[in-house]
Amino acid sequence: MRILEQKPNQKILKIMKKIYFLLIALLLNVSIYAQITFENTYDFSTGDDATDVLELDGGGYLVCGNVFDDTNGDYDVFVAKFDANGNETWSEIYVGVGVEDDFAEKITETSDGNFIICGSTTDETNGDTEAFLLKINSAGTEIFNKTYGVVGDDDIFYYITELEGGGLAAVGSSTEGTEGFTDGWLAFIDDDGTFVDEFFYGLNGNDELNVIIETTDGGFIMVGNSYDEANGDIDGMLIKVNENADQQWIVYSNTTADELFNDLIILENGDYLIVGAEEDVTNGDLDMALTRISSNGSTELYSYTFDYDGDDDNAYSVYVDKNDDVFIGGYVTNFDAGDTDAYLVLIDPATGDILGEVIYGDAYDEHFNNFSFTSDNGFICAGSQEDDNGDSDVYLVKANEEGEVTTRIDKIENIAMTISPNPAVDYINIHANTTDALNFTLTDVSGKIIEKKALTTNQIDVSNLNSGIYFLNIESKTSKNMFKFIKK
């Protein structure tokens, strides 16, 4: 409200001034958060791979995956927490899951503020695999660690979810259901890790379940893959069960080529959207695939394939935005370069047209195992990247809503860097303890980019800027620094 013909009260002006700067600070924080992007690798050991990532309510990300233990010669589970800028807060390697190889597949947050990781571990005595659940608190401290399955059988959990009424549901594969083959396996487990019940699904070949979602009718929808003995190929399968886990219907992709169903979401109208890969019978390679099936499983509404290049491409996760555009994440193979690159693609579901795509990576192999939308309308993606030594490192990418990464850091280093003067009139002087080539991005409080280019001298001309608050991002191949300054 504006009051006319009234002289300002100096005390009120001071209060309003404080409120103004407080609002600027709040807007500033929002702007910084909205603009944060990074492309980082993290070297915990050898053979590192991130299999899943969560955005945390309090900010930052929690990542699970696997690292190779050079001393024991086996794989162990790791969990790491990163802040909103991609800096590591803490990391833990859990060697007690099993004596031999342990592989984490999925991490989910539970209603008590803790986290559950599922996967598989190798039994040293029998040589078979057992499914495991590892529960940790927000600091990474282990709460419980339990294995599931029958001795002599191979059992794996690929996905874990918390149920609306309490307890957990995990899916994967097990050889217990049909002798000599793996069946799709659904297990119900109490919050404390106590095994409750199990169910098996599939045909006479090897079957697996990759994702489970609790439905509004109290039942479940599950997606996975099945080996078709008749055709000698792999079919994607979609299974609907009721609250008692009784099968209501099952749909197979059922073509003469291999088809993989890797991820699933339920659309607002109840239809199912599935991503994975489909074999190109002409070239013999895999293409990314997107399939929509009606809510009752009776109709395949569409099925699109996307062939990036002349070799294997695969999609591991799918999301839909508020405009009903479909985002797919996975990897594509660069035929000319001979390597794989991590990949995000935006699809128009009405036509199957590619509206936009982003390739992430360098001259070595990269892939995304999972990605999700973030609270600032961007993306957080997790996977692995091969380094110069042929070893793989954890690969974490935070992109904006366009899939862009405006700050790239291959290896995080702390470089001493300051700016002066602050406030500034004509120039900002850069004081950096590095010989690396530097680039800078100058933005205002709204996040609008004013200038972005290589830093060729130790000064940046700010004489043409209006008075106010600005941000200066200075980065190299291995570092980044953010500064706030006032232009007089």
Image: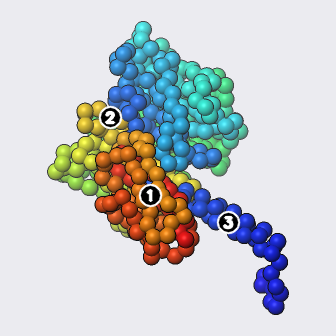
Tell me: residue 253, above or below residue 24.
above
Label 2: how many residues lie within 10 Å, few (<14), some (14-19) or many (20+)?
many
Q: Give amino acid for label 1.
A: Asn
Percent coordinates x, y for residue 92 in the rendering: 51, 27
Q: Give amino acid for label 2.
A: Ser
Q: Which residue is mark 2?
A: 392
> Who's the residue at 45% across and 73% down the image?
463
Q: Give amino acid for label 3.
A: Phe
Quarter occupied by the C terminus: bottom right
Tell me: residue 383, above or below residue 124.
below
Percent coordinates x, y for residue 322 in the rendering: 54, 64
Residue ranking furthest to the bottom: 5
Of badges 2 and 3, nearer the viewer stands: 3
Cα–Cα span, label 2 and label 3: 46 Å
Percent coordinates x, y for residue 387 in the rendering: 29, 37
The answer to whether one can see residue 128 in this image is no
- Number of callouts in the render? 3
> Who's the residue at 50% across and 60% down the image?
421
Tag 1 secondary structure: strand
Classify residue 306 as left or right of residue 67.
left
Tell me: residue 260, above or below residue 326.
above
Q: Earlier in the sequence, mark 1 or mark 2?
A: 2
Q: Which residue is mark 3?
A: 21
Q: Earlier in the sequence, mark 3 or mark 1?
A: 3
Quarter occupied by the N terminus: bottom right
Residue 473 got which mark?
Answer: 1
Tag 2 secondary structure: strand
Classify residue 192 as left or right of residue 176.
right
